Image: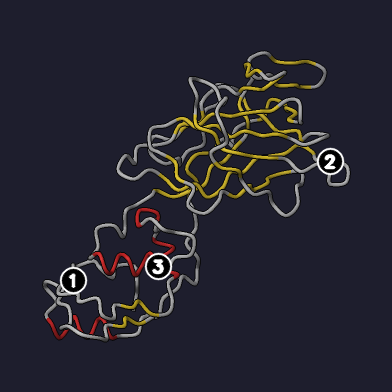
């Protein structure tokens, strides 16, 4: 990638770099990309905990698992995906595909509207299934959200762990999975139950989930306004500087155009994340 600073006006000056160095920086081609791929981290998971039974989610009985986000209070988080462990599943035309969504807590239950609807994997199968969040799905810090599952016509059976099992080690700071789940029956949300064989446990248990994402960081908003605008314009589907991630910066190709921008100075860090 290159920076185009053609047009009227003097070359901008970045403090501490010197005019010659600044002009050289702006004119150098930048080869950017992320060959290894910037991967989301596991924010919280209970996949390593022992299973106690199954639960069915279908058109009539929805299931919802609450989780608590962490302490990144300055910017929150970007949700990348949610993984669910299925006991068994039927494929179309035998069943409709499930709907997995994220809702914000509404006074202790998920009775509000869907905040994000996640995309299903290419094929629903027994074992781990990854449901992908839309681009730029933001979660606030220190907040409770719910993974809501509607299983389709014949339903899907999910694995559960004990309510007191806790979470796997390595969770992001402050993240946890709350020790209960809820199910929606006849239009009402009630404490969930776990079916194990021919019995039903009233304590509900916890759905097996893994939440993947990254800490959200205002990497771009504090940059020189013209640089900030040029960067945001290069990221498809993003209009807010606060939504630009390190992966977005690494993926930028082409030219950042500052033609006729009349930039008189630059900040240190204006081109961080764009490697040359």
Task: State which quadrant residue 65 falls in.
Answer: top right
> In percent of the image, x 53 and y 42: which residue is there?
211
Q: Which mark is residue 266?
A: 1
Q: Residues within 10 Å of mark 1 (few under 14, many from 20)?
A: many
Q: Residues within 10 Å of mark 2 (few under 14, many from 20)?
A: some
> In percent of the image, x 82 and y 35: which residue is there?
153
Point out the tag, 3 or 1, that comes first from the N-terminus: 3
Q: CA distance from mark 3 to mark 1?
A: 18 Å
Say which of 92 and 52 sits in front. 92
Q: Secondary structure at mark 2?
A: loop
Q: Which mark is residue 233?
A: 3
Q: Residue furthest right?
A: 94
> In the image, which is nearer the foreground, mark 3 or mark 1?
3
Residue at image mark 2: 95
> In percent of the image, x 80 and y 41: which residue is there?
96
Q: CA distance from mark 3 to mark 2?
A: 42 Å
Q: Secondary structure at mark 1?
A: loop
Q: Is residue 170 left or right of residue 5?
A: right
Q: Is residue 163 left or right of residue 248?
A: right
Q: Is residue 86 left or right of residue 147?
A: right
Task: State which quadrant residue 86 falls in.
Answer: top right
> In the image, which is nearer the foreground, mark 3 or mark 2?
3
Question: In what quadrant of the picture does the N terminus appear?
Answer: bottom left
In the rendered image, residue 39, in percent from the top left (x then y), is placed at 49, 58
> In percent of the image, x 36 and y 68: which residue is there?
231
In the rendered image, residue 151, in percent from the top left (x then y), is placed at 74, 35
In the rendered image, residue 32, in percent from the top left (x then y), is placed at 41, 76
Q: Residues within 10 Å of mark 3 (few under 14, many from 20)?
A: some
Say which of 10 and 141 sits in front. 10
């Amino acid at each position: 990638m290159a920076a185009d600073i053609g047009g009227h006006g003097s070359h901008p000056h970045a403090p501490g770099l010197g005019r010659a160095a600044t002009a050289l920086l702006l004119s150098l081609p930048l080869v950017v990309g992320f060959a290894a791929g910037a991967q989301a981290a596991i924010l919280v998971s209970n996949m390593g905990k022992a299973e106690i039974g199954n639960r069915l989610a279908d058109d009539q009985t929805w299931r919802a698992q609450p989780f608590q986000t962490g302490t990144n209070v300055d910017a929150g988080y970007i949700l990348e995906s949610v993984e669910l462990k299925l006991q068994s599943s039927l494929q179309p035309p035998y069943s409709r595909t499930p709907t997995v969504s994220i809702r914000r807590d509404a006074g202790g239950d998920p009775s509000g509207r869907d905040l994000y609807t996640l995309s299903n994997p290419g094929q629903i199968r027994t074992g781990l299934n990854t449901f992908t969040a839309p681009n730029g799905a933001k979660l606030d810090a220190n907040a409770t959200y719910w993974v809501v599952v509607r299983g389709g016509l014949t339903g899907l059976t999910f694995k559960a762990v004990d309510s007191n099992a806790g979470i796997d080690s390595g969770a992001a700071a402050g993240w946890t999975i709350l020790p209960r789940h809820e199910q929606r029956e006849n239009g009402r949300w009630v404490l969930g139950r776990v079916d194990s064989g021919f019995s039903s446990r009233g304590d509900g248990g916890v759905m097996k989930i893994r939440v993947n994402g990254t800490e959200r960081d205002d990497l771009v908003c504090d940059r020189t306004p013209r640089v900030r605008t040029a960067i945001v314009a290069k990221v498809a589907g993003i209009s807010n500087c606060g939504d630009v991630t390190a992966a977005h910066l690494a993926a930028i190709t082409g030219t950042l155009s500052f033609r006729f921008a009349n930039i008189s100075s630059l900040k240190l860090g204006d081109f961080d994340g764009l490697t040359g």
